Image (spheres, rainbow, N blue to C red):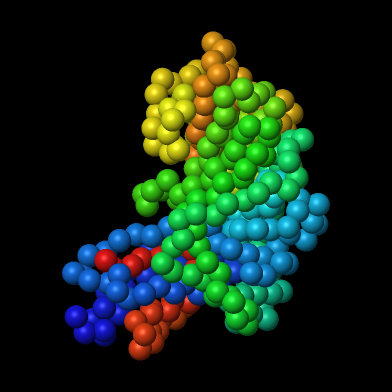
Amino acid sequence: MPISLILKYFLLCALFWGLTTIVFSQSIFNSSLVKENKIQFFKSGFITNIGQYSNLTVGYENRGTVKYGYEGLKMPILFTGSGLVYLQRKIMKKDIHESDREKKIKKEEEKYIAIDKTITMQWVQANPNPEIIAEGLSTYYHTYGLLSEKARVFTKLTYKEIYPGIDIVYSIKDNSQKGFEYSIVAKPGADLSKVKMNYGGDIVSLRKNKEGKLVIKSLVGSITETVPVCFYNDEAADSLTVKSKKIHVATKISGNEISFVFPEGYDNKKQVIIDPFVTALNDFTGDNSDKGYDIDYDYEGNIYVRGGGDYIACE
């Protein structure tokens, strides 16, 4: 297929679904993915921090060094050794007074104001420096401004032994929902009562909605976690895909702290997995949301897209 036709398909896809995030990354992938005019939707994975997030945690340095970022929800979610930092932004029109109208302000950017908020999540009394294993290397990578290094992208992060005998596994569930899944994997004999999450930053409420989902809200947006699913895993299996009997589990809210309780108990001689899904309850809007800025290609078969976050490829 002529490269010009490929680019037309890609550009139409990109303009329809959007490409923008706060860090304005550039996504690069090989055009060998483009064949048979088949369109596929890719989600942003876990992006290695090569310095692009260095100025995004001002005031939250005690949360630890940012290791990875997820850019699939308009604003980045930052992964540190001790937890997560959710960045949020809402673009609002300024109240224009009569005197301003008389001045006939023409610059569009002067009519809007950005409101930034941050929600943090920290694993309570956990290993402050867990080993983090990144898996599922993607075929594409990100570049950022003047940074020369390529930011590699992964589909799975495992925090090893964040509590004794307990791993936290973050993963991209599928290509149909914005967000990511995390699994609390407890080996036989591990104590799940130690697993606690403390939310802070700019939260104004932490509650369950009528569906039982956990909703963490700031003044500009919310993060939601699905009702957790808990089950025994086959001890002989090395994969989270082998599941057996479900276990009754519930989230307990105490102030800004979340833990898990088991009303009917469970057999801690088996491997146990707790499995929620994290996403944004609503998108953060603005003039530059969901826009692609530039597209180009080179003679090695790479397609370059300036924008970031979610994008479309043809496969």
Residue 82, how many percent across, how many down? 71, 46
Q: How many marks?
A: 0
Q: Nearer the viewer, residue 87 or 128?
A: 128
Residue 57, how many percent across, how many down? 73, 59
Asked if 93 appears above or below 263 in the picture, the reply is below
27 sits to left or right of 128:
left
Residue 241, how many percent across, how many down? 39, 36
Asked if 47 appears above or below 272 in the picture, the reply is below
Q: Nearer the viewer, residue 300 or 206?
A: 300
162 sits to left or right of 229:
right
- The image quarter in which residue 48 lies: bottom right
Q: Quadrant of the C terminus?
A: bottom left
- Please say whether residue 27 is visible from this viewpoint: yes
Q: Quadrant of the N terminus?
A: bottom left
- Please say whether residue 44 is visible from this viewpoint: no
186 sits to left or right of 103:
left
Residue 282, how many percent across, how many down? 51, 48
Asked if 211 appears above or below 108 in the picture, the reply is above
**Which residue does the image show at 52% across and 66% down from the upper left?**
152
**Which residue does the image show at 57% across and 30% down from the upper left?**
186
Farthest front residue?
236
**Which residue does the image show at 61% across and 22% down from the upper left?**
189
100 sits to left or right of 149:
right
Q: Nearer the viewer, residue 299 or 254?
A: 299
- The image quarter in which residue 8 lies: bottom left
Q: Nearer the viewer, residue 16 or 79?
A: 79
